[in-house]
Image (cartoon, rainbow, N blue to C red):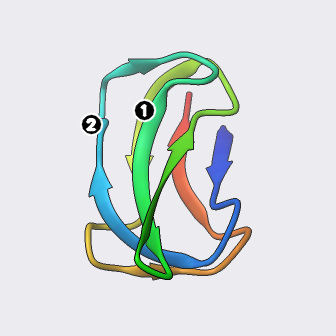
Amino acid sequence: MKQVKAEMSGSIWKITTAVGEDVVIGQEIAILESMKMEIPMESTENGKVHAIHKKEGDFVEEGDILIELE
């Protein structure tokens, strides 16, 4: 499985993909909120979303797995 990890710490403001959806490198998959700024998180891999490990409102640390792709 390929993994998309958080590039920084923050709260997940919005998940913009769903299990079963095909994503491509550079596609927005989530939006983090950090220090009152919204930061888009982009897929670093091509694939189909197998699992979403975090939900909206969760706090993530840099390196946490957000999404697994098959």
Q: How many marks?
A: 2
Q: Residue 33, how many percent across, how many down?
A: 42, 70
Q: Is residue 12 left or right of residue 63?
A: left
**Percent from the top left, x then y, of residue 52?**
39, 53
Q: Is residue 15 left or right of residue 40?
A: left
- Whether residue 40 sits left or right of residue 30 in the image: it is right
Q: Could you tell me which quadrant the C terminus lies in?
A: top right
Measure the C-alpha gap from mark 2 to mark 1.
7 Å
- Mark 2 element type: loop
Establish if 54 lies above or below 43.
Answer: below
Query: Tag 2: Cα neighbours inside 10 Å, few (<14), some, or many (≥20)?
Result: some
Identity of the amino acid at label 1?
Answer: Val
Image coords of residue 66 (percent x, y): 52, 58
Instruction: Examine the rendered structure and indicate whether residue 19 appears above or below residue 8.
Output: above
Disc 1 marks which residue?
Answer: 49
Amino acid on which the number 2 mark rests in the picture: Ala
Instruction: Write the residue at 71% across / 73% down.
Output: 62
Q: Is residue 13 above or below residue 43?
A: below
Residue located 59% across and 33% down the image: 43
- The circle on residue 18 is 2
Contact (Cβ within 8 Å) of mark 2 with mark 1: yes
Check the image and name the residue furthest to the front.
36
Question: At x 69% / y 33%, what residue is drawn?
Answer: 44
On-image quarter of the N terminus: top right
